[in-house]
Structure formats: C-alpha cells, structure tokens
Image: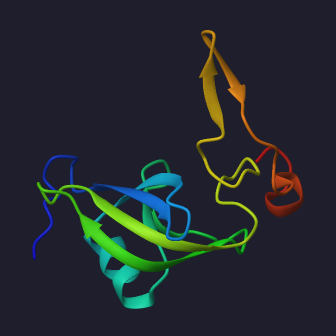
Amino acid sequence: MQLDYTKFDGLLPAVVQDAKTGRVLMVGFMNDEAFRRTVATGYATFYSRSRNKLWIKGESSGHRLAVTEIATDCDSDTVLLKVEALGPGVCHKGYESCFFRKLENGQWIESEPRTYDPDAVYGEKA
C-alpha cells in the first residue's frame, strides 16, 4: 500500500500512541526513508524538519520507541504508531508524553510531574 507524502512536502504526520494505555505520547513527521527504517528496525524513526535529517527516537536519551503496530488513516497521509516506550519519558522536556499541558481557565498548566531530568539526559537547556 502506498502512503501519500504529497500533502506535507514529502512528509507524513506520525501520531505515536502507547500500545497499552492508548495515551498519545508525541507527534512527529516521517519521510519515506524514515517510514521504511521504522518498518525494518521496529524502532520509531522520524524526519527532523529543523535539522533536515533522520533521527531515531532515543538516539541521545536512550528512550526508544519499540513499534508494536502501524496503521494509516483513510487518506493514507498520516500514520499511527503504537509503541512500547523504553524509558521514563518520551518528551525531551522530561515528561512521559509531549502532551503534558492542559488548558484550564484560559491558561496552560503542567498537568503531570516530570518523569526524568532532561538536563541530566541531554545536557543543559533541553
């Protein structure tokens, strides 16, 4: 089955979901090569738009994402990766999920504690 990379300049949004809990952990982007590497290795690989290169989630932190299932939406222009997170968190700011803020009374608040110290993992100013 072909995926449609044409809508986002050669990229697909990739929604990453915890396979056990169903919680959305992050959203990244994949080009065809990142998708193929993910399938081949079983670990989530993305395309960094800011660095213009492939990156394997966890290559610096060790917090890898072992892919257990891959699905696509009805238009074949977005993928869903169900994963087992290998580490205390997915977010580079030290949280289990990148979605650690919620809107309350017009203000964004942190809705959970950090699960690891990002400065210890990535160095200062993660």
What residue is at 29 percent from the left and 62 percent from the top? Answer: 79
Location of residue 111 in the rendering, given as x and y in whole percent from the top left corner: 72, 34
Query: Hey, which quadrant is residue 2 in on the image?
Result: bottom left
The image shows a total of numbered marks equal to 0
- Apparent side of residue 67 relative to residue 113 in the rendered image (left or right): left
What residue is at 82 percent from the left and 62 percent from the top? Answer: 121
Location of residue 71 in the rendering, given as x and y in whole percent from the top left corner: 27, 69
What residue is at 57 percent from the left and 68 percent from the top? Answer: 57
- Apparent side of residue 2 relative to residue 26 in the rendered image (left or right): left
Location of residue 91 in the rendering, given as x and y in whole percent from the top left corner: 66, 53
Considering every residue shown, the one lying at the far front of the view is: 21
What residue is at 76 percent from the left and 48 percent from the top? Answer: 126
Considering every residue shown, the one lying at the far top of the view is: 106
Q: Quadrant of the N terminus?
A: bottom left
Instruction: Report the front residue among 22 and 38.
Output: 22
Considering every residue shown, the one lying at the far bottom of the view is: 40
Query: Hey, which quadrant is residue 90 in on the image?
Result: bottom right
Q: Is residue 123 above or below residue 61?
A: above
Query: Hey, which quadrant is residue 81 in on the image?
Result: bottom left
- Apparent side of residue 84 relative to residue 33 in the rendered image (left or right): right
**In the rendered view, how is the structure colored?**
rainbow
